[in-house]
C-alpha cells in the first residue's frame, strides 16, 4: 500500500530501464509511450524478410547492458558476441584498415610512423576514459564537490584548453588518423572540429573495451527490457502520449493521457529534455550551444551476400573537414562520411537467404529554427551529378519522401556506388529516416540535444528541472549523455532519484523500497 506511483514518460531505452528498476524495487509504475511501438530512437523495421535496427547499431560497455537486468534480478540481456574486426575503415586513398581490440594487430597494418601515433592516441584515450568514467559515466550528475575532485585529480591531464583536433595533431596524427580519431566525437553529436579534447575518451570505449553484436539486434534489448519490466509489475502503455501534467506546490500530482488523469507521486521523463520543459509550460532553454548533429539513414534491402564483409564499415571522404564545414552552414555534405552496418553478416536471420540488410547513415544538420514544408530543400549539395533514381521512397511510417529527401537519398546511394563496390541493381527496396522524422523524437531532429562544445561542453544537462521536486529526467539529452550504455545509466539514475525522493516525501515508504547506489 506504501508503493509510490511513478509515471514514466517515453518508452525508449532510458524509459524502459527506469521502469524496470522502479518496478523491481517495489514502485507502482505506468509507462506512457506516444508511438505505437516501444523503443524510441532504438526502433526496428521489418519488411519482406529483412530486419533493421533504425537507430543505434553500435553496442559498447556490454557490462552496463547486463547490469540493467542483474540489478533488477529479473530477465537477461540478449546474447552478445564481440566483433572482430570492430569496424572496417576505408579511406579515399584506397587503404582498407580492419580495426580490432588487439592494438598490436591493428597497428601492424599501418606504416611505422602511423602505428606509433595510433598507439599513443589509443593510450591517451584510455587515460582520459579511466579518469572521466567514474565521475561522468557511472555516477549521478556531478555536483561542485565531485567536479572539484575530478579537476584536482585529472583536470590538467584532460587538456581543458585544447580542442580535439588540436590534441590529435599534437600527438602525431596524420590526415587519415586525424579523421579516424575525430569521428568518435560524433558519437556524442559533436562537430569534431569544435569538440573539446576530452572527447577523445570515447575512442577507448570502442577500441579498448570492445564492440559487440546483439542477437536480434539492438531492438532485442528493447524487447528484453520491456518483458522484464512487465514481469516486475510495470504497466507499459503504447499509443498513449502524456498531454499535460498537474503541478501543485512544486510537485507533479498527476499526468493526463488519453483523456484520463493518473495520480502520481513522481515522474520520470525519458523523452527529449524539451518535452519535459513543454509539459511544465516552460519556454525552450536559451541556446548556449547549437543543437547536436542529426542524421540521414537509408535502409536498403540488398540482393547478394558478402561473407567476407564487415559488420560495421566506415568510408571516409577525401576532405573530412569540408563535410563539417557544410554541416555548420546548415547544408548536407556533397561527399559525406558513409557509415554502414550490415547485421546479417553476424546474424544471417536478419535477411532472407542470399540477401543483406544495409543500414547506411550520414551526418546531417539539425532542422532550422523555423523549418519549412521541405526543410532539406535549401540544404541540398550543389553540382551537376545525377542522383540514383530508384523505386518509390517512403519513410518508416509509410509517408512519401519529400522531393529534397528523395534527391538526397539518391545522392547517398550514388556516393555508395562511387566509393564502394555497391551495385544499385542489387537494391530490392529502400526506406529512409531523416531530420524531419527524427524531429518526432527530439528537438529539431538533433539526436543528442545540445552539441558538446567548449571547456564545459562535455557536461550534459542536469537530469532535473528547477522548481519541480518529484521529476527526474532521463535519456540521451541529459547526464550522462547519448549512446546505449549511457541512456541505460540515465534511466537507472532517474529511477533511484525518484525512489529516494518518494521515501523522504512519504514516511513509511522506505521500508518497502530500495534506492540503488545511483540515488541523488
Image (tube, grey):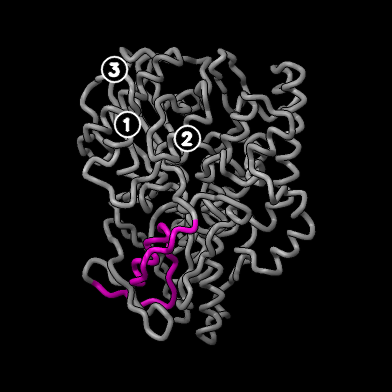
Q: Which mark is residue 325?
A: 2
Q: Can the viewer see residue 155 in this picture?
A: yes
Task: Tell me: residue 297, above or below residue 383.
Answer: below
Inter-mark Cα distance, 1 to 3 = 13 Å
Report which residue position mark 3 lands on.
386
Q: Which mark is residue 380?
A: 1
Disc 3 element: loop
- Is 173 on the left or on the right of 497, as rendered? right
Residue 428 among magenta residues: no
What's the residue at 54%, 80% (across, down)?
A: 503
Do the residues bearing badges 1 and 3 touch, measured as CB atoms within 8 Å?
Answer: no
Q: Estimate the x, y position of residue 482 in percent, counting from the top left.
A: 51, 49
Inter-mark Cα distance, 2 to 3 = 23 Å
Query: Which residues, given as a range, are shown in magenta?
Result: 260-288
What's the residue at 62%, 47% (across, down)?
A: 196
- Is 407 on the left or on the right of 44, as rendered? left
Do the residues bearing badges 2 and 3 touch, measured as CB atoms within 8 Å?
Answer: no
Task: Tell me: residue 398, above or below residue 407.
Answer: below
What's the residue at 33%, 73% (across, down)?
A: 245
Q: Estimate the x, y position of residue 430 in percent, counting from the top left.
A: 29, 27
Disc 2 element: helix
Amino acid at each position: 500500500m506504501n508503493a509510490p506511483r511513478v509515471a514514466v514518460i517515453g518508452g525508449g531505452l532510458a524509459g524502459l530501464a527506469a521502469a524496470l528498476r522502479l518496478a523491481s524495487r517495489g514502485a507502482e509504475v505506468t509507462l506512457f509511450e506516444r508511438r505505437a511501438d516501444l523503443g524510441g530512437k532504438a526502433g526496428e523495421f521489418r519488411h519482406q524478410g529483412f530486419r533493421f535496427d533504425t537507430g543505434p547499431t553500435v553496442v559498447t560497455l556490454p557490462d552496463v547492458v547486463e547490469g540493467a537486468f542483474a540489478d533488477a534480478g529479473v530477465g537477461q540481456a540478449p546474447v552478445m558476441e564481440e566483433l572482430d574486426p570492430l569496424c572496417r575503415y576505408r579511406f579515399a586513398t584506397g587503404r582498407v584498415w580492419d580495426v580490432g581490440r588487439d592494438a598490436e594487430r591493428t597497428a601492424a597494418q599501418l606504416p611505422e610512423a602511423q602505428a606509433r601515433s595510433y598507439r599513443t592516441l589509443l593510450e591517451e584515450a584510455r587515460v582520459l576514459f579511466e579518469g572521466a568514467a567514474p565521475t561522468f559515466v557511472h555516477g549521478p550528475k556531478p555536483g561542485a564537490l565531485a567536479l572539484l575532485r575530478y579537476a584536482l585529480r585529472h583536470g590538467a591531464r584532460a587538456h581543458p584548453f585544447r580542442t580535439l583536433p588540436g590534441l590529435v595533431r599534437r600527438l602525431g596524427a596524420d590526415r587519415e588518423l586525424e579523421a579516424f580519431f575525430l569521428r568518435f566525437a560524433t558519437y556524442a553529436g559533436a562537430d569534431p572540429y569544435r569538440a573539446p579534447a576530452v572527447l577523445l575518451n570515447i575512442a577507448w570505449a570502442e577500441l579498448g573495451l570492445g564492440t559487440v553484436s546483439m542477437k536480434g539486434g539492438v531492438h532485442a534489448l528493447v524487447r528484453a527490457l520491456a518483458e522484464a519490466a512487465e514481469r516486475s509489475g510495470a504497466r507499459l502503455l503504447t499509443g498513449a502520449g502524456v498531454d499535460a501534467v498537474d503541478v501543485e506546490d512544486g510537485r507533479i500530482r498527476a499526468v493526463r493521457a488519453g483523456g484520463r488523469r493518473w495520480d502520481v507521486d513522481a515522474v520520470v521523463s525519458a523523452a527529449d529534455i524539451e518535452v519535459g520543459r513543454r509539459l511544465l509550460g516552460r519556454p525552450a532553454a536559451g541556446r548556449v550551444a547549437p543543437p547536436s548533429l542529426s542524421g540521414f539513414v537509408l535502409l536498403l534491402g540488398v540482393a547478394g551476400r558478402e561473407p567476407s564483409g564487415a559488420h560495421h564499415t566506415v568510408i571516409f571522404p577525401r576532405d573530412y573537414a569540408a563535410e563539417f564545414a557544410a554541416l555548420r552552414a546548415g547544408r548536407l555534405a556533397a561527399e559525406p562520411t558513409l557509415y554502414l552496418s550490415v547485421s546479417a553478416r553476424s546474424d544471417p536471420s536478419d535477411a532472407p537467404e542470399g540477401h543483406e540488410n544495409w543500414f547506411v547513415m550520414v551526418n546531417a544538420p539539425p532542422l532550422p529554427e523555423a523549418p519549412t514544408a521541405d526543410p532539406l530543400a535549401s540544404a541540398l549539395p550543389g553540382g551537376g551529378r545525377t542522383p540514383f533514381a530508384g523505386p518509390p521512397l517512403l519513410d518508416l511510417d509509410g509517408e512519401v519522401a519529400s522531393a529534397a529527401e528523395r534527391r538526397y537519398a539518391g545522392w547517398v546511394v550514388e556516393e555508395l556506388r562511387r566509393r564502394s563496390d555497391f551495385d544499385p541493381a542489387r537494391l530490392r527496396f529502400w526506406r529512409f529516416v531523416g531530420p524531419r522524422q527524427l524531429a518526432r523524437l527530439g528537438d529539431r531532429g538533433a539526436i543528442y540535444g545540445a552539441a558538446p562544445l567548449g571547456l564545459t561542453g562535455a557536461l550534459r544537462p542536469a537530469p532535473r528541472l528547477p522548481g519541480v521536486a518529484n521529476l527526474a529526467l532521463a535519456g540521451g539529452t541529459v547526464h550522462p549523455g547519448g549512446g546505449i550504455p549511457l541512456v541505460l545509466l540515465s534511466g537507472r539514475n532517474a529511477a533511484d532519484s525518484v525512489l529516494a525522493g518518494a521515501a523522504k516525501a512519504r514516511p513509511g515508504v522506505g521500508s518497502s523500497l530500495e534506492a540503488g547506489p545511483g540515488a541523488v
